[in-house]
């Protein structure tokens, strides 16, 4: 019996496939699943139907000729050759071209449910809850094993070693997965976490289908606690992503969204502490300057108080030397002196006024008409008392009055005669 190595056997089988002409130009119809576009331009995907699955790859040279983009759930007809990948002993379809067929059953169900839930308002941004800033408890609904939970724990603890993580070990694939996910959301809601991460690692559309179930979508929508969906890879989208309050591209990103980095907070606290210390020092300097200023004011006030006190004592001594009786006696003497002075002044004023009056009387006598009448002269006036001193003031028949020494004569003018020689 010949003994072959693994590589020899895989190579032998590969050669058998290459020598089978029908397998070198075969057309296969199926639904695309688990499709991945590599950075090199190659497309890796799986063709499936109700009974089986077939791994496929289309290299960059053939992929450039496609007039549409592969998507999970899309039905296609792929032309290529069946070959064995020797390093892994796995056979696959090496696709050279593809033609788009009808949409697959899962894709139809996905689009129908998405449209209906969107119309019901489950995707409305207005009803989505914000993620709390200071999260202390994070609930996680995912499988207890696998990369997703490890990534969430690793990223969360790196960002905040003190964060509390509560894991609900849910079934995320296969029969019973949707019920398990709903129970996990309800359990963590009762536990009282701050935010819930619901998710799993990547996979085909069938693998992720539990997160496309309506009961899961309703549980996420009705949850009063903010929910972050983290299902599959960045290119994977599920109904849970549209319903959740925040969609994370990967479980690691979900942890970054839920858990704030404690180093940033510590830096913020340190900055605030330094700023507070600086403000406190500044306030202390200001208060010390105020104290110094107040001390100077206090010294000046004390000096002023001493001066006022000394002056008050001086006034007190002066007042103590002046009794009320002495003050009244002094004022009384002063009043008497003023009375005497006022009396002397009044006498002098009266005497002066009498002398002035006598002088005026003598002056009046010299010009008085009555004194002239005593000397034999007369005073002529009209009946109204107006003095008449010229012949021109008289007219024939005019009444006039003549006042002489011993009486008054009432007369009438008989005739006037003017003379040129006036004595």
Image (cartoon, rainbow, N blue to C red):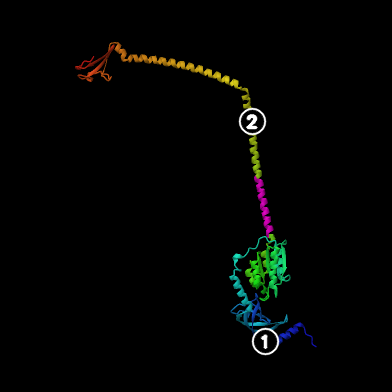
How far apart marks 1 and 2 lie (CA) works out to 125 Å
In the rendered image, residue 321 lying in the magenta stretch gets the answer: no
Q: Position of residue 351 (x, y in %)?
A: 44, 15
Res 23 label:
1
Question: Could you tell me how many numbered marks the image carries?
Answer: 2
Task: Find the magenta span and give its range.
Answer: 264-286
Q: Secondary structure at mark 1?
A: helix
Q: Which of the image's four quarters has the C terminus?
A: top left
Residue at the spot x=61%, y=71% of the render?
A: 117
Quadrant in the rendering for residue 300: top right
Q: Earlier in the sequence, mark 1 or mark 2?
A: 1
Q: Can residue 18 be seen in the rendering of this structure?
A: yes
Residue at the spot x=64%, y=45% of the render?
A: 286
Q: Can residue 247 be seen in the rendering of this structure?
A: no
- How many neighbours does mark 2 have within 10 angstroms: few (below 14), some (14-19), or many (20 or more)? few
In the rendered image, residue 283 lying in the magenta stretch gets the answer: yes
Above or below, 15 relative to 123: below
Residue at the spot x=72%, y=64% of the render?
A: 165
Q: Secondary structure at mark 2?
A: helix
Above or below, 297 relative to 373: below
Quadrant in the rendering for residue 224: bottom right
Q: Which of the image's four quarters has the N terminus?
A: bottom right
| Extreme-right residue of the structure | 1
Residue nearest the viewer, comparing 127 with 324? 127
Q: Position of residue 10 (x, y in %)?
A: 73, 83
Q: Is residue 164 left or right of residue 349?
A: right
């Amino acid at each position: 019996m010949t003994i072959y190595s693994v590589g020899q056997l895989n190579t032998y089988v590969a050669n058998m496939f290459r020598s089978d002409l029908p397998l070198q130009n075969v057309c296969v119809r199926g639904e695309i699943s688990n499709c991945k576009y590599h950075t090199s331009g190659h497309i890796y995907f799986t063709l499936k139907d109700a009974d089986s699955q077939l791994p496929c790859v289309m290299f960059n040279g053939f992929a450039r000729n496609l007039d549409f983009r592969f998507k999970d759930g899309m039905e296609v007809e792929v032309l290529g050759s069946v070959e064995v990948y020797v390093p892994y002993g796995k056979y696959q379809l090496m696709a050279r071209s593809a033609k788009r067929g009808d949409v697959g059953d899962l894709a139809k169900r996905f689009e129908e449910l998405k449209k209906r839930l969107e119309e019901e308002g489950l995707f409305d941004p207005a009803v989505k809850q914000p993620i709390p800033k200071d999260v202390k408890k994070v609930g996680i609904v995912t499988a207890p094993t696998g990369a997703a939970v490890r990534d969430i724990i690793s990223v969360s603890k790196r960002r905040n070693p003190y964060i509390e993580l509560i894991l609900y070990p849910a079934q995320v694939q296969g029969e019973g997965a949707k019920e398990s996910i709903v129970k996990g959301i309800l359990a963590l809601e009762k536990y009282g976490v701050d935010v819930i991460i619901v998710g799993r690692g990547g996979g085909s559309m069938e693998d992720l289908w539990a997160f496309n179930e309506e009961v899961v979508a309703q549980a996420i929508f009705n949850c009063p606690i903010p929910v972050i969906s983290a299902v599959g890879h960045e290119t994977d989208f599920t109904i849970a992503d549209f319903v959740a309050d925040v969609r994370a591209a990967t479980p690691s990103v979900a942890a970054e969204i839920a858990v704030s980095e404690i180093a940033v907070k510590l830096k913020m606290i340190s900055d605030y502490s330094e700023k507070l210390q600086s403000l406190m020092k500044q306030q202390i300097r200001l208060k010390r300057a105020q104290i110094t200023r107040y001390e100077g004011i206090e010294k000046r006030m004390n000096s002023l108080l001493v001066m006022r006190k000394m002056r008050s004592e001086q006034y007190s001594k002066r007042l103590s030397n002046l009794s009320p009786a002495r003050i009244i006696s002094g004022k009384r003497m002063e009043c008497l002196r003023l009375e005497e002075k006022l009396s002397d002044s009044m006498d002098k004023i009266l005497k002066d006024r009498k002398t002035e009056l006598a002088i005026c009387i003598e002056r009046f006598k010299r010009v008085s008409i009555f004194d002239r009448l005593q000397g034999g002269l007369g005073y002529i006036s009209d009946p109204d008392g107006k003095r008449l001193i010229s012949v021109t003031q008289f007219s024939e028949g005019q009444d006039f009055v003549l006042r002489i020494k011993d009486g008054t004569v009432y007369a009438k003018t008989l005739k006037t005669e003017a003379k040129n020689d006036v004595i």
